[in-house]
Amino acid sequence: MTRPSTSRSAWQHKVLRGAMFTGAYIATLLPLASSALAASKDSPKAIVDEAWQIVNREYVDGTFNRLDWQKTRMELLKRNYKNRQEAYIAIRSTLKKLGDPYTRFLDPQQFQSLNNQTSGEMSGVGIKLEANPRTQQLVVAEAIDNSPASKAGIKAGDAIVAIDGKSTKNMTLEGAISLIRGEIGKAITLKIARGSLRPFDIPLTRAQIEVSSVFSEVKQEGRLKVGYIRLAEFSSHSSEQMQKAIKNLNSKQVNAFVLDMRGNPGGLLQASVEIARMWLDNGTIVKTVDRKGGNEDFRAVQGALTQLPMAVLVDGNSASASEILAGALKDNRRAQIVGAQTFGKALVQSVHSLSDGSGMAVTVAHYYTPNGTDIGHKGVTPDVKVDLSFMEQKSLAESPSLLGSNKDPQYLRAIAVLQPKNMATPNNTNKVPAVSSTRQN
């Protein structure tokens, strides 16, 4: 989870892919080493000192991994840096001594990518691509509603054979995405192959696209009419998308929910709190503790959108904000957690921009589940443990369409948990009876 460097009331909490961030202690910056350095605040040496000072005032470990942090600063400022790259190397080398892989330096390009990711928006044409393992073609998995691609008639299943005249043969998925994304308002032409038609060009203009992180549908599973929701990450748009999904499924009179957070690496802390409040009327959601021992509790606010029984699917790649939400629903006995042990990331970071456009993520606190459990390096333990075999994992990874189907063992177990005999009674709809924990290979 991350926090930009602003006043406490304006902090935005984030949980990033591979790193989670939360609260931070704000202190006065130390003076720069010299008037010349202060006068050149975007000089390489000044960037180094900016980074040092952010760690000095916020890092969760006040001993700095038993380093003499003041001495470290003096050593850094004695050096001469010929360019920013040398400064970046010095910052990364210094941060490594903290022994915390989640406190890290981001060059301008990495920092921009991080901001784009957590914003839930991108500059592009609004298509989701996948590589067809049989034909090796790059295929449109989805054209996002109201995007330039959907308005131009691009459909799921269309193959992209060229991008601005450049063949996609042997092109990686990442390479194609890099070419398709670009500056808003700039033109791009995709050559499309569709069925037996001759390949044809579709001119498009890049726009700012809101990326969907919530996908939902109704599934009829025997007597159960299930509202299935897949939450891919916690971006700035996730809570509004989740609210829309829950209300839509309620209108279709579902009688249970399955929330699928498998593979969800995290995102914004605020989004996780807001989404938890859509499922919980009462109780603590998450507790954070900073290096001063200051703690903050995030609580439900009587705003639940449904009281229907629910199961939550998690796996070893469910991290950070996913674990916050899963922990909140488990400890408050609002849902049964089904699947594999989660990632185990209980640290909180703040994200800061530096004056040259680079940035930093700094661990600033620990977080705990409502019951006070520290899930660091352990993860959230499912109520019903269902570990997949290697082949089952491979099958679901290669064919995401199988998720939430009768070929998905973890989903099937969630449905079994929610069968009427296991459901909460109408007078106790916030509680789901415990189910014996089992292991499936």
Image (cartoon, grey):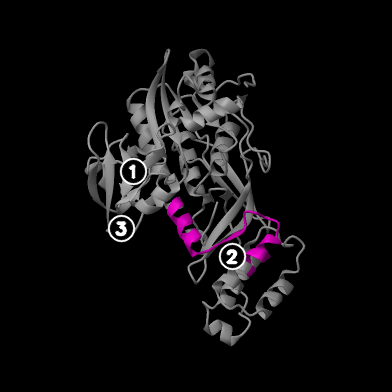
Picture residue at 60% right of the left edge, 59% below the top: 104
Q: Residue at x 25, y 40 (%)?
A: 199
Q: Residues within 10 Å of mark 1 (few under 14, many from 20)?
A: many
Q: Residues within 10 Å of mark 3 (few under 14, many from 20)?
A: some
Q: Kindly identify the residue that appears in the image at 50 percent across and 72 percent down.
A: 355
Circle 1/circle 3 CB separation < 8 Å = no
Nearer to me, 296 or 26: 26
Residue 252 quadrant: top left
Quarter of the picture holding the C terminus: top right
Magenta highlight on residue 44? no
The correct choice, above or below, for 171 with respect to 315 in the image is below
What is the magenta range? 90-117
Query: According to the image, label 2 marks what residue?
Result: 26
401 versus 201 height, above or below: above
Sequence-first disc among 1 and 3: 1
For the residue marked with disc 3, what is the amino acid?
Ile
Discs 2, 1 touching: Cβ within 8 Å: no
The answer to whether residue 296 is visible is yes
Residue 378: percent from the left, percent from the top? Answer: 68, 38
Quarter of image, res 344: top right
Of the numbered discs 2 and 1, the one sitting upstream in the chain is: 2
Q: CA distance from mark 2 to mark 3?
A: 36 Å
Residue picked out by circle 3: 184
Q: Nearer the viewer, mark 2 or mark 3?
A: 3
**Tag 1's secondary structure?**
strand
